[in-house]
Amino acid sequence: MEYNVVLPKTNENGYYEIRLESIGGLGANLCGKMLGELGAVYMDLNAASFSSYGSEKRGSPVKAFIRYSDRNTEIGINSPVESPHILGLFHEAMIGKSAVTAGVTEDTEVVINTDAAPEDIRERIKLYAGTIYCVDALRIAMDSKTRINMVMLGAIVRASGFIPLDAALEIAKETIGKKYPALLEANLGGIKRGYEECISRHFPPAGYPYVPYKEVQSEWGYENAPIGGVNPCYGSTVSNDLSASREGYIPLFIKERCINCGLCDTTCPDMVFQFSKGEYKGKEAMINMGLDYHHCKGCLRCVDVCPTNALVMGVEREHPNPEYAMRNQRLLPEHMEYEEAGANSYVTSESYLTENRVEGGLV
């Protein structure tokens, strides 16, 4: 079905622009693609969408850019969106790590995944101006058994004021329904709740300066990188805080059950488990001392592989200070890009609903 849509406002080029700021693993790339297809297929608009990211791994910064224009205006640029009409922030902890609110004006609609009120968020992110839409996408995703990007899609549709909700539901049926039919109803429910449950407030310019958009520049590039330079951390995540890409759950360690078999350390992709020399059953052995949650992305492979249920799944919000949390002292670089980021999103598995809780976790 095609909807007759008139763009409420455009920039000097005749474009309506959206920028999504996220972290790898939260689905901003797919959300951007769906928004682009919404414009071209369902709303009789010219549309373009693309994403920008580095290594495809959880914890890496991700940006998605979407442009709309009417049929008589061609989209002739393929550059980042500098001054968005809608800014989607998939995680509030990204604020302060990079200038994610750069280019935001009084006419910008800012949609943010948070359980805080718009007034609190405005102070926290030091927003120059604009309308803030707050939606607790993490809670809704966990309740609806969907993903955070679907909840954010619903909230972005609401903030736009012109994208029909029915069109968003149709694109979800086409995109997700064909590939994952069993998850379709949950995703449709997430979109609807994101649309219905976001709250908003407009803020005029006051108190905080305007932040201009500027592309991120690395200290080293092709012109000044040392000849024969070596990256000692290739393919690893030791320099990023992966907690921002967790999906609502963490492994909890029940030390008295542990037999120090090392299977958790073998299966962990991110060097989370901390073993040191000690004694087990009267013999010298490498002893599991705890988990480096800073580098844990919540994949829960360790929970699956543990033979004694010494590792169980727990809801992260219920365990803000998990026992046996221990940073890896050998992997403490001077600068952490997302040091303060917290957990979010959701694991699509429904198995936790039928399991029994053991000491705050599941077996």
Image: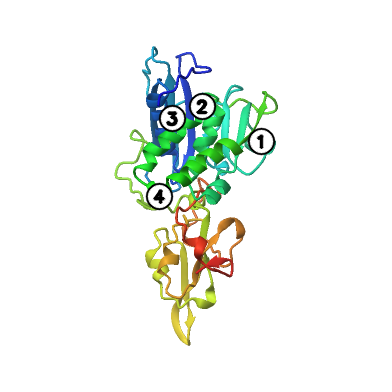
Near mark 1 (Cα within 10 A), the count class, few <14, some 14-19 or many ≥20, is: many
Looking at the image, is mark 4 or mark 2 earlier in the sequence? Answer: 4
Query: Reading the chain from its start, which is encountered first: label 3 or label 4?
Result: 3
Residue 55 appears at what percent x and percent y? 37, 44
Q: Identify which residue, 133 or 187, lies in the foreground.
A: 187
Residue at 43% across / 24% down in the picture? 67
Residue type of the residue flagged with mark 2: Tyr
Sequence-wise, the earlier of marks 1 and 4 is 1
Image coords of residue 212 (percent x, y): 54, 25
| 227 or 94, nearer to the observer | 94
Q: Which mark sits nearer the N-terminus, 1 or 2?
A: 1
Query: In the rendered image, which residue does mark 2 sit on?
Result: 213
Check contact, mark 4 vs mark 2: CB within 8 A: no
Query: Identity of the amino acid at label 4?
Result: Ala
In the picture of the structure, the residue carrying the numbered disc 1 is: 118
Question: Which label belongs to residue 182?
Answer: 4
Q: Amino acid at mark 1?
A: Pro
Indicate the secondary structure of the residue bearing disc 2. loop
Q: Secondary structure under badge 4? A: helix
Q: CA distance from mark 3 to mark 4?
A: 29 Å
Cα distance in 3D space between marks 2 and 3: 14 Å
Dot in front, 1 or 2 = 1
- Determine which residue is flagged by label 3: 65
Figure check: 278 above or below 97 = below
Q: CA distance from mark 3 to mark 1?
A: 24 Å
